[in-house]
Image (cartoon, rainbow, N blue to C red):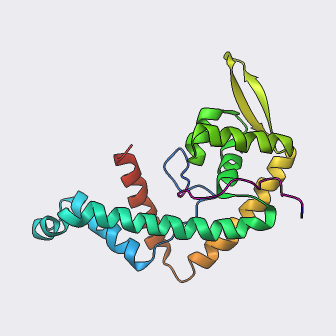
């Protein structure tokens, strides 16, 4: 079977976030009990709540939180990767498509940071996407030494199909969850990411 337009790069990354701190269209939140406990511990620790409880959990907080986030990241990425196989894409591919969907064109450095992959990997991904007609490169008008990457119409169509896949997976993951709980978790995770960057 011929390789799909987004095949060839393995997926082992974390949830993508939009530049304004909100979960992007291609981000699928997941909050099993073990993640909720860790985030609640983080909230208690950072809100100046019960000092006795905070003091008790503080030595284990970072360890538990890191473990819970790693488990959630792995679960979400694995589920997304399986779903995107029908389009021959990886999670990293979808992140690059999402970044470029604003129509402004982005540097390779921006693509690497948003896709959460090292520069050599994003170069291979973009090269492949160019070959399959999903993106194209132009010189940056403000600095001819830099290259900007843009979506092609074919890339835009693929991005729309991936959006539908992600919506389907998100509905399955969030079945039965209260909207307020989802918003709270996303806010806490976004706040944590901001604190650590």
- The front one of 173 and 92 is 92
Residue beneath the point at 56% across and 49% down: 18
Q: Which residues are magenta?
A: 2-15
Residue 141 visible at all: yes
Give left or right: position of 36 versus 179: left
Q: Residue at x 65, y 51 (%)?
A: 95
- Residue 43 visible, this orientation: no
The image quadrant that residue 158 belongs to is: bottom right
Relative to 8, is 164 above or below? below
Q: Position of residue 6 (x, y in %)?
A: 77, 53
Q: Is residue 197 above or below residue 84?
A: above
Which quadrant holds the N terminus?
bottom right
Vertical relation: 55 (above or below) 16 = below
Of 130 and 97, the residue lying toward us:
130
Please provide percent x and percent y for residue 128: 79, 44
If the image is split into quadrants, where does the C terminus sit? top left
- Residue projecting furthest to the right: 1
List x then y, in percent, for residue 191: 38, 53
Left or right position of 4 against 163: right
Answer left or right for 44 relative to 188.
left
Q: Main secondary structure of the magenta part?
A: loop
Which residue is painted at 16% across and 66% down in the image? 54
Single out the residue that lies furthest toward the bottom.
Answer: 176
């Amino acid at each position: 079977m011929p390789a799909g337009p987004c095949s060839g790069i393995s997926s082992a990354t974390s949830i993508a976030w939009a530049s304004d701190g909100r979960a992007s269209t291609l981000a699928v939140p997941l909050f099993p009990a073990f993640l909720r406990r860790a985030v609640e511990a983080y909230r208690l620790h950072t809100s100046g709540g019960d000092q006795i409880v905070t003091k008790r959990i503080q030595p284990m907080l970072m360890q538990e939180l890191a473990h819970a986030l790693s488990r959630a990241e792995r679960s979400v990425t694995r589920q997304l990767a399986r779903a995107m196989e029908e389009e021959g894409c990886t999670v990293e591919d979808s992140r690059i498509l999402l970044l470029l969907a604003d129509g402004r064109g982005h540097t390779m450095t921006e693509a690497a940071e948003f896709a959460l992959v090292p520069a050599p990997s994003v170069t291979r991904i973009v090269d492949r996407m160019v070959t399959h007609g999903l993106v194209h490169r132009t010189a940056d008008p403000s600095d001819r030494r830099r290259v900007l990457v843009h979506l092609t119409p074919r890339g835009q169509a693929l991005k729309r199909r991936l959006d539908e896949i992600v919506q389907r997976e998100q509905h399955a993951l969030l079945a039965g969850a209260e909207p307020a709980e989802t918003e709270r978790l996303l806010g806490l995770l976004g706040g944590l990411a901001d604190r650590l960057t």
